[in-house]
Amino acid sequence: AQRVTQPEKLLSVFKGAPVELKCNYSYSGSPELFWYVQYSRQRLQLLLRHISRESIKGFTADLNKGETSFHLKKPFAQEEDSAMYYCAPHNDMRFGAGTRLTVKP
Amino acid sequence: DTGVSQNPRHKITKRGQNVTFRCDPISEHNRLYWYRQTLGQGPEFLTYFQNEAQLEKSRLLSDRFSAERPKGSFSTLEIQRTEQGDSAMYLCASSLRDGTDTQYFGPGTRLTVL
């Protein structure tokens, strides 16, 4: 079965600092992974997917097959980035437990 | 189309009662998913449909839970003989099986079992 693990439940950084939210996967084959985000009082929504290799709101995520990771990164965090972030495999409905990011002013 | 909608948004019931939730997906989406989310946890998969066929059910879905999508459009999730442990946010999502399978989520139905 496809599994993702988000080792940090909470992450707090100051505005302007770099941020990295960790996601590790544990399944074989060619993984396809997503990051979803849930801002306060809003519905869960897609942030980015690795196959498109896009940058959304300054976030990027690179699939590292050697480390079996798909970490989400942003060089300069903003207060509006504060939210819950979930890693999820494509075509499998087992979301990670989530990381709550707080960006302090 | 305003996206995925769920009704009701909130439901308070007494233990032992039956409840039914409805999800209306984005109209052209052929996949529909149900999740349960409790405080501090990620969405836990319950079941999903492709058109009207229920393709997978989690073992979390006890026999008190049943879901239907009779015409391949809206779906209902029924919980019979509710227990306090059923209190959670129930999320619905839909996707188009087009290779990306991006899920679009509804606002959720918050169930409180007293």
Image: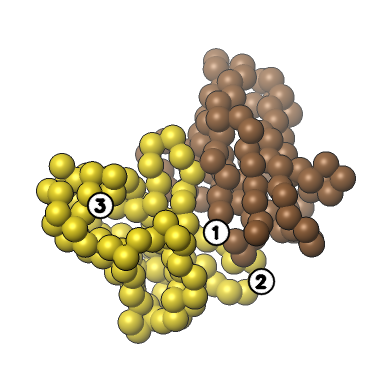
Chain colours: A brown, B yellow
Give the residue pinned by disc 1: A93
Asked if badge 3 and badge 1 are on a common chain, one would say no
**Could you tell me residue A34's position as x and y percent?**
64, 52
Give the residue pinned by disc 3: B9
Which SS class for mark 1?
loop
Asked if badge 3 and badge 2 are on a common chain, one would say yes
Task: Locate residue B10 relative to residue B72 in the image: left or right.
Answer: left
Q: What's the amino acid at mark 2?
A: Gly
Question: B32 above or below A10?
Answer: below
Which SS class for mark 2?
loop
Instruction: Pick whichever, B19 or A87, lies toward us.
Output: B19
Q: What's the amino acid at mark 3?
A: Arg
Q: Which of marks 2 and 1 is in front?
A: 1
Q: Give the Cα distance between marks 3 and 2.
A: 31 Å
Q: Residues within 10 Å of mark 2 (few under 14, many from 20)?
A: few
Q: On the rendered image, what quadrant is the N terminus of chain A found in?
A: bottom right
Q: Residue at x 64, y 33 (%)?
A: A7
